[in-house]
Image (cartoon, rainbow, N blue to C red):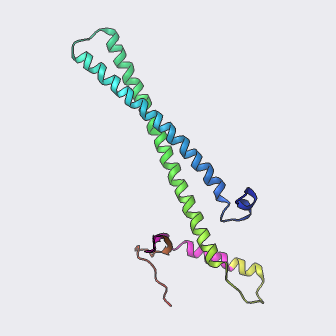
Amino acid sequence: MLTREILIANAALSGLTDAKRVVAELKTKAESASALQTQIDSLTKEKARLEKAIADGATDAETAKALKQAKADLQSVTTQYNDLKSKYDEAEQTHTKEVFGIRVETALQTATAGLKFKAGLPESATKVLLGQAIDKIKGMNPEFIYDGKGGKMLAFKDENGAIMRNPN
């Protein structure tokens, strides 16, 4: 079971608590967006009804005032919806990038877990060298691609978007 202490202790898993927070935030924003979309739909119907009433000859001051108010309400709610949607989309993109970063970090940690260094090298030096190598690898445009067996595998692409092959 993943406890908060384990998540904090493991660098690759430390982002999961943030990921849960972001998921909850995205869910709240999606529910708000849904409520605003419902309100937009009802205001649009009301506006159409009032415009039809005016077109049919009901041009009293109260109907015109109601139409003007419906248009203003619709504009306001539409603006709120668009603002919320852009914030939601931005949060979703940020979350996707964070999750991708965690997946790449985890894959690289798994791949480097079994590495053995010469016994004479100090541990601090090997950690620095390994960190530099991992940073260099992360800069090689990592991407998860389908492996043909129903799963995904980590691949690296060059500047042209072609998968880099191991020269050995």
Q: Quadrant of the N terminus?
A: bottom right
From this viewpoint, is residue 141 visible? no
Q: Indicate whether residue 135 is drawn in magenta.
A: yes
Image x and y of residue 83, in percent? 47, 39
Is residue 163 placed above or below 57 in the rendered structure? below
Is residue 147 placed above or below 165 in the rendered structure? above
**23 vs 150, nearest the viewer:** 150
From this viewpoint, is residue 166 visible? yes
Image x and y of residue 17, in percent? 66, 54
85 relative to 117 in the view: left or right: left
Image x and y of residue 39, in percent? 43, 29
122 relative to 79 in the view: left or right: right
Quarter of the figure with residue 125: bottom right
Number of marks present in the image shown: 0
Residue in the picture at 77% in, 89% down: 119
**Residue furthest out toward the left:** 56
**151 vs 114, nearest the viewer:** 151
Which range is magenta? 129-150
Residue in the picture at 54% in, 44% down: 27
Is residue 108 placed above or below 58 in the rendered structure? below
Residue in the picture at 45% in, 36% down: 81
Image x and y of residue 155, in percent? 49, 75
Quarter of the figure with residue 160: bottom left
56 relative to 1 in the view: left or right: left
**112 vs 140, nearest the viewer:** 112
